[in-house]
Image (cartoon, rainbow, N blue to C red):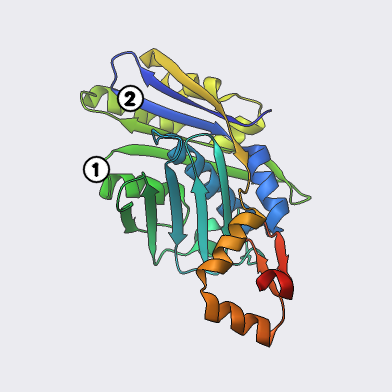
Amino acid sequence: MKDYLIKGIDELGRIRVYVASSTNLVENARITHNTSPTASAALGRTLTAGVMMGAMMKNEKDVLTLKISGGGPAGNIYVVSRNNGIIKGYIDNPQADVPSRADGKLDVGALVGNNGSITTIMDLGLREPYVGQSNIVSGEIAEDIANFYAVSEQQPSAVSLGVLVDKDISIKAAGGYIIQLLPGVSDQDIDKIEAKLASIEPVSAMIDKGMTPEEIVDSILGDFNMQILEKMDIEYKCDCSRERIEQVIISLGKQEIVDIIEEDGQAEIVCHFCDTKHQFNKKELK
């Protein structure tokens, strides 16, 4: 299935939903960073959340940076997304892994850790970016994102994120959804949604069965006459370039560049997001 996400809202404007099918996106990130199975799940969940959160922004130039810092073996997880479905990210320790849980599932919480914070930085083209932060709850990512919306944004949200890793450590299925309750939603509607969420399969299992984002919306919110507002392709893609790396080197200042020339005679800059190595020889540095 092609990766894409959808945005929807019910006919009375009380319930907003985002659903993403992100299997290929997460597989591309796994290949790029050569992640362990549990690191693939942790990074994949964060990328899936980040691409939906990025789609919530209004303008093409808006940039969302999401940082998960739980204090576990994974180190920090970073993703950067825009409102056009393009996202990139990395995990500090891609080869870190931990034993699976007693039920056989990957222990993402143990890898990420639960002693830290979630930080979002939204660059909306204003003088200062908007920064939001909340504590890590479990390290399982979905619960932590839901808690972030409740604490930092005062936005009640249900979040589900899933990554199925195959026996050959490739990504078998990945996806997620964010359901947000808007002013005017009744307690009865909330109870109905909660009951449905408690009874459905994990989102990764639904994706693995071939269910589309539209079908997932219908399975959860079929009683609410949901309207699909937008459908958007999503992709893991780094936007680094030699020209942008040149600007990074220039920003170091003349003396720092002179020191590099005298000490090493060359420079190698590696992009964290795509692992591309950019080489600059002595002449280029001068």
Q: Determine which residue is flagged by label 1.
A: 154
| Side (left or right) of 252 relative to 26 | left
Q: Position of residue 255 (x, y in %)?
A: 53, 81
| Side (left or right) of 104 relative to 109 | right
Q: Residue furthest right?
A: 168
User: Which corner quadrant of the image does residue 173 belong to?
Assistant: top right
Which of the two labelled residues, at mark 1 and mark 2, occupies the earlier sequence position?
Answer: 2
Q: Residue at x 48, y 44 (%)?
A: 50
Indicate the quadrant containing the N terminus: top left, top right, bottom left or bottom right.
top right
Q: Residue at x 49, y 30 (%)?
A: 19
User: Which corner quadrant of the image does residue 212 belong to?
Assistant: top right
Q: Residue furthest bottom?
A: 263
Q: Residue at x 63, y 32 (%)?
A: 3
249 or 274: which is nearer to us? 249
| Within-10-Å neighbours for mark 1: few <14, some 14–19, many 20+ | few
67 or 150: which is nearer to us? 67
User: Which corner quadrant of the image does residue 225 belong to?
Assistant: top left
Residue type at mark 2 is Ile
Q: Determine which residue is flagged by label 2.
A: 15
Q: Position of residue 67 (x, y in %)?
A: 45, 57
Q: Gap between marks 1 and 2, in whole Å?
A: 15 Å
Residue type at mark 1 is Gln
| Side (left or right) of 70 relative to 212 | left
Badge 2 marks a residue whose secondary structure is strand
Q: Residue at x 62, y 64 (%)?
A: 99
